Amino acid sequence: MPPTIPFLNFSLSKVLTGEQDNFAKAKIKIAYVMLMFALVKIVITIPIAIMHHQHIQAIRSGGIFLIFFTCLKYLLYKPQHMRAIAHVVLITGLLIIWSNLVFVVQQLNIVTVQVVVTTVLCSFYLIGNRTAVVYATLCILPVFLFMIITRHSNAVVIIPPQQVVSPVYEIIVFLNFVSIAVINYLFYKAYENSVIEKDELNAQLAVKVAEVKALADSKSMFLSSMSHELRTPLNAVIGITDLLKGSASAEQHENLEILEFSTISLLSMVNDILDYHKSENDKIELEAIPVNLPELLSKIFSTLRLKANEKNLRLVVNTDERLNTICVVSDPTRLTQIIYNLVGNAIKFTKKGRVELNVKLTETTTEHIQVQFVVKDTGIGIPQSKFESIFEPFSQASTDTTRHFGGTGLGLAIVKKLLLLFNSSINVKSEVGKGCEFSFSINFSVTEAIVSKPKIPGTALKMAHLNVLIAEDNSINAMLLEKMLINWGIKTYWAANGQEVVKKLKTETIDLILMDLQMPLMDGYETALTIRSLDDPIKSNIPIIALTASISGDIYPQVIAAGMQDYLSKPYEAVALYEKLERLAASNKTNLKPVISI
């Protein structure tokens, strides 16, 4: 709508220029057409009525002319008051109907019916809703009352009827029909334009949705690729470090511990970034694995202790002794992330004093237990006003926190999202300068068997009969994997791409394939499908374990669909790989059964 329209404006186009909505334009046009037709009919009627001494008709027409002309002028000056103008026009139409039937014409002629139809149409087109129903009822009601009264009564009105004479009567009837047709056309045109506009908007929306989906897919592909590119070298660093620790001196062992800790810290940061993307897309699903909580916490704290020692902090873990003999079903990877982020944050923001984790068994039944985790520190603390914002992504309690302490600002955001998967939430207590306390409780299902990971027996020959084909395009990772397997007495073969895998499988005796999913020429999926289609039933049914650094949440279904038995995520632990291979060795070279991987 234009900010100002001149008072003496008589141009409809100026009024319509500021309107964007099709129906708003249609309402203005309908009111304008109705008023213009009415004024033309009145201008024709008044002189004829005066000539035939129809003074009531002339006076009434003059009054209606003044009302409609004022409405028309106001419409062209203040179109934003369209609704008020419509009420005045419709009320005047009601007065015309009632006065025609009772005083002026005193009969139900075609003109009166036309006025009824026009008023009803305009009530719905200009006002709508329940108000239009009221106007329509008031328009139709006098017609029925008049028909009933004249049928059953001979009452005579003292005032003689003053019907418009010919040919003015015929002209008015014609103009009424034209105005009704034009009003309907304008409304239909507005409806048609709105449908066209909606279709255009839907088409634009479909394009935008496609662009957003393509952008999201591109983002997912980029992060998946970045995951592979980042985790693959980290896998080599962690693996080589683990191999060197077995034959290192005391001083070298200490240096390797520092290297391993730094690599795991970097891996944790990479995992935070990639897992936050997965949580945004609701792609994180919890695994169900038997876990002994004290053993898991011991492993987590062995990694964090070096970081605490660097700052001369006392790192304490107090675990309820009753948990030592209980095995729960949980996702150790996600639970590790939660504890690692909370305790790691506490160490980061504590300059002196201590950081402690208290783990307490609060409720117990035959099938479930509830465990409370409390992380306390003597660090810088958090203002109460920041309790909510610290759980937002890329947000920290102070603007200079990153500059002083580092970090991505994703740790607590991920903790919050992961706890939601555990049907839990985190509570915060803190006082600036005196430290923080983060606490949460998780309900675990209890399982009878306590499963502990096997210790790798170094140069054991339990699997010496196995021939394993390593399908890996990264030579460093292939060399690392080969050293691991040779150390366990396994004979290895190496293929740098899918085509070489198929060739070597045909020419060599292979018991198992460790297959990287991202390889040139033929990726792991295509290679697996090709192997499964081989004519030789022994070759085509060979067990395949996929190796991947991807963050995709639907890897396992894809792996199974391609005919592979299982997968390991990079960087994987030697223990996890050994466990899977030992199961194969124990099954006397039978097919590997699918298991939930770490």
Image (cartoon, helix red, strand yellow):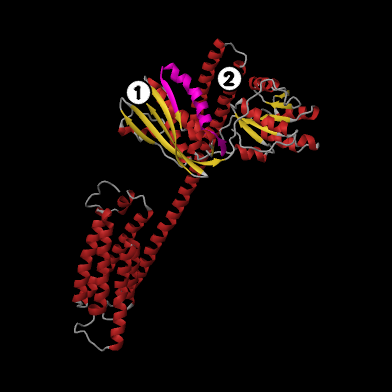
Residue found 47% across the figure and 49% down from its top: 202
Q: Give x and y (percent) for residue 132.
A: 32, 66
Alpha carbon separation for disc pair 1 and 2 = 33 Å
Circle 2: residue type = Val
Residue picked out by circle 2: 237
Residue 227 placement: quadrant: top right
Q: Would you place residue 416 above or below residue 315 in this image?
A: below
- Residue 295 lies within the magenta run: yes
Which residues, given as a range, are shown in magenta? 288-317
Q: Is residue 162 visible?
A: no
Residue found 49% across the figure and 37% down from its top: 279
Position of 328 with respect to 497 (left or right) is left
SS class of the residue under badge 2?
Answer: helix
Circle 1: residue type = Asp
Label tally = 2
Residue 172 placement: quadrant: bottom left
Q: Give x and y (percent) for residue 110.
A: 34, 76
Q: Nearer the viewer, residue 425 or 562?
A: 425
Q: Counting residues from the N terminus, which is met first, the one under dot 1 or under dot 2?
A: 2
SS class of the residue under badge 1?
Answer: loop
On residue 424, the disc is: none
Residue picked out by circle 1: 400
